[in-house]
Amino acid sequence: MAVFQKVGGLHSKNNFSFALVVGNLFASPGTVTDEDARDIEKLINGEIRIPLPTYFVLGTQELPTPVIKKLDESDGELCENLIFLGKRAIFKTSQGIRIVALGGSRISSPTADEQKDRYLPVYSESDAKVLRGANSADILITSQWPDGIRNGSKIELDTDDNLEAQTCVAELCTALKPRYHFSTSLVFYEREPFFHDRRADQSETFHITRFISLGSYTSPNKAKWIYAFSLDPTASLPVSLPAGVASSPFSTHDRKGSSQPDQNSLRFSTGDHYARPSDYRPRKRKRPEPLTQEVCFFCLSNSDLATHLITSIGNDTYLTTAKGPLSTRDTFPSLGFPGHILIIPFSHSPTLSLISDPESRANTIKEMHRYRDSMNTMLASKSPQVLGTVTWEVSRLAGFHVHWQWMPAPLSFIQKGLVEAAFKVEAENLKYSRFTSPKPTLKLPDPSEEDSSDFFRVMIWNPQNGSDVEMRLYLDQSFKFDVQFGRRVMAKLLGLDGRADWHDCGQSHEDEVADAEEFKRAFKEFDFGLEE
Ligand SMILES: [Zn+2]
């Protein structure tokens, strides 16, 4: 592993904060020589010293079996200072540098097993979409090139290398606006730095990306394989364009991202995959600190997110089938799937009114209603005049990641006022305060929420007369509110008492996949997330 010696030599002169390996760290399993195998063994046994914290991603080749075994046992730490970021990763280094990575090559319709396997060097378009939920990044690493990256570039690239550039990678870069985007190729390629379209966030400042594709350390043509840079995640963004910075090659791919204005910034320097923040102080070795959001079940940035449950991804919000759904496939036989769906904002915020960026808040609320309306429309077309819907939200300052739970309910129950009554009666039984009387559902950010009082709300849609009303229960100190209240009420109403607790409703992975797929099929023609 001569590469670590080389890096060690450079490190002793430059005192880098960390190193990133952006391509394949190991030879492909088919070509492993005896010497490679011995090196791998030494690495795993800690007999090769890694001079500084070094992070590696999944490249385009499979990892050797002993490596996978060790990573599984050691939670991603192959040996001291050598840490595997994974195939689809978001993390922050101890210096506060946010890295997003997408390894492998894109395949169009992965099987559930392929999707689950975190060491298989393939990803799907939805993996790329999921990472857009990270909102921002200092460094983006992708095995494949973004499609269109050479548009408008004057820099020659003398290779016929099939780079298999991907549109979804370009979209990811546009959404995250990283300071550096690294990939790999046969030859070294550094594109002119470019700035991102500012219409999305109407900001006064420029987000500038440098795309750098590194050659291989073992490449016969001696392509440049190493690049050092310094990055200060705390400096402010430029308000004017530095010389030589061109417009984004992806303008045609530009989608309205959900990205919140990023306050961080970059101090450019030229030079030779290392980062050294200007405030660098030598520290003890530290594992990357997971972002708090990463342990959130609803944050797309959680690398353990149950992506097989995701049924649609919009610009600011997404849909998943509920884990341990209240309803089953038999509850609403005309549907063929359980129909218990969550509408979840990308923003990790305890309430909708606390999403800090006003534009992002408005877009999120608008899109949640759009999803709810689309699903209502789907229901009306699939089971005309049989089902209405009930949607509920718990909005508390002390909450975690606000979301809506949506599910069908028999139209006859809604017409007879049984849904309303069920919520009111249960609130009374539990000695909660009273629900407000039903009002038309407000589909815009609600100025009255600015005071941020805690509340539970339920929205009831009746397809027969088109009425859509909401009732609120304001939460105060006088009673202890059960966050499962909505589900409990619906369980009683639908005669599903035994399913009131989602923990009792676990499904096999296969059934979860099948239900999500069935929902997607039904929702396809109503899914605006697929159009854009
Ligand atoms: Zn979250």
Image: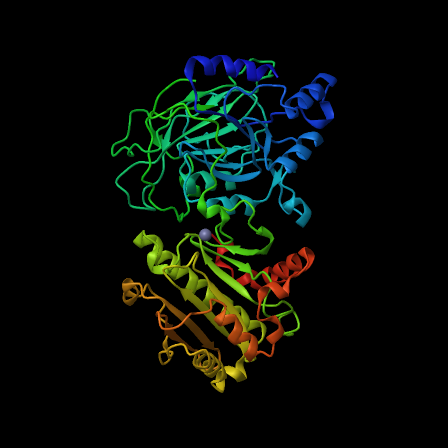
Spot occupied by residue 199 in the image (x, y as percentages of width and height)? 32, 45
**For residue 409, which quarter of the picture?**
bottom right
For the rendered model, the colour scheme is rainbow
Spot occupied by residue 410 in the image (x, y as percentages of width and height)? 55, 79
Residue nearest the viewer, comparing 338 with 293? 293
Residue nearest the viewer, comparing 218 with 71? 71
Q: Is residue 162 above or below residue 390?
A: above
Is 4 displayed left or right of 192 in the figure?
right
Spot occupied by residue 130 in the image (x, y as percentages of width and height)? 51, 47
**For residue 379, which quarter of the picture?**
bottom right
Q: Is residue 209 visible?
A: yes
Number of disc labels: 0
Q: Is residue 62 visible?
A: no
Farthest residue in the bottom direction? 416
Spot occupied by residue 29 in the image (x, y as percentages of width and height)? 71, 27
Residue nearest the viewer, comparing 198 with 112? 112
Q: What's the residue at 50%, 35% (across, down)?
A: 146
The quarter of the rendered structure image containing the N terminus is top right
Is 40 displayed left or right of 146 in the figure?
right
